[in-house]
């Protein structure tokens, strides 16, 4: 039976951790476990042993924790964008959608340019850009879903004085 030895680059098998937009970061990060204890233990193990094969359990545990954290963060980001689409004034929601669409276009162009890079650095850039592109597209889709589920303006005007949460609290 052959034993598989994990190295730090094995953490790059899935998508990279999502980038959290500053305007919704406080809502997204609220109550999220960040795996700090596991990460400190992994770095301590690497410093003591200076050889990664002795840290297999820590690498596998950190990878699992990071995957769970990233999955939860992505869900919260999409949920926040969906809520913003429902609560923002229509003009602001359209501006936000336009901004996200321009980010998608920019990331697509950067990904095309990175496709010409060779070696590990080219792989890392493509991996990172691809993850950012997918996350931004999902944010745009979630925002558009929120806009589609908006209540007609007449109903929103009646309900707004009673609601304590508004879209401005998200900024």
Image (cartoon, grey):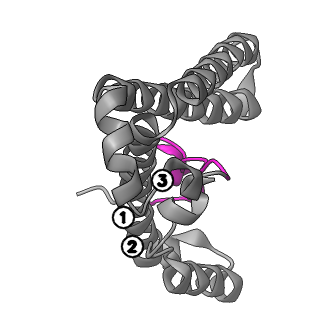
Q: What element carries label 1?
A: helix
Q: Is residue 51 above or below residue 88?
A: below
Q: Are marks 2 and 1 in contact (CB under 8 Å)?
A: yes
Mark 3 and mark 2 residues within 8 Å of each other at the beta carbon: no
* Position of 111 relative to 16 (above/below): above
Horizontal arrangement in the rendering, residue 168 relative to residue 137 (left or right): right
Q: In which quarter of the image is the N terminus?
A: bottom left
Q: Which image quadrant for residue 8?
A: bottom right
> What residue appears at the point 39 percent right and 26 percent down from the top-left corner?
147
- Taking the image as drawn, is residue 24 in sight? no
The stretch of residues the image draws in magenta is 4-22
Residue drawn at point x = 76 percent, y = 12 percent: 113
Q: Where is residue 85 in the image (x, y as percent from the top left)?
A: 44, 34
**Nearer the observer, disc 3 or disc 1?**
3
Nearer to us in this view, 163 or 121: 163
Can see residue 143? yes
Instruction: Tell me how far mark 2 sits from mark 1, CA to CA.
Output: 5 Å
Q: How far apart are marks 3 and 2 (CA)?
A: 39 Å
Q: 10 Å neighbourhood of mark 2: few (<14), some, or many (≥20)? A: some
Per the image, the residue denoted by label 2 is 61
Closer-to-camera residue (46/134): 134
Q: Is residue 28 rendered magenta in the image? A: no
Residue at x 37% of width, y 28% of height: 153
Decide which of tag 3 and tag 2 comes sooner along the chain: 2
Indicate whether residue 8 is drawn in magenta.
Answer: yes
Residue ID for mark 3: 166
Q: Mark 1 points at which residue?
A: 64
Q: Main secondary structure of the magenta part?
A: loop
Dot 3: element: loop
**Closer-to-camera residue (3/19):** 19
């Amino acid at each position: 039976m052959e034993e598989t030895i994990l190295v730090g680059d094995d953490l790059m098998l899935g998508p990279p951790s999502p980038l959290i937009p500053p305007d919704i970061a406080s809502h997204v990060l609220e109550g999220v476990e960040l795996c700090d204890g596991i990460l400190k233990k992994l770095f301590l193990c690497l410093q003591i042993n200076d050889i990664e094969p002795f840290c297999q359990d820590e690498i596998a545990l950190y990878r699992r924790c990071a995957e769970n954290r990233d999955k939860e963060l992505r869900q919260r980001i999409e949920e926040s964008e969906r809520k913003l689409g429902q609560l923002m004034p229509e003009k602001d929601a359209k501006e936000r959608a336009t901004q996200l669409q321009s980010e998608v276009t920019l990331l697509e162009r950067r990904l095309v340019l990175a496709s010409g890079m060779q070696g590990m650095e080219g792989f890392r850039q493509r991996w990172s850009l691809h993850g950012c592109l997918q996350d931004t597209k999902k944010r745009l889709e979630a925002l558009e879903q929120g806009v589609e589920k908006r209540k007609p303006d007449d109903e929103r005007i009646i309900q707004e004085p009673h609601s304590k949460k508004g879209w401005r609290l998200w900024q």
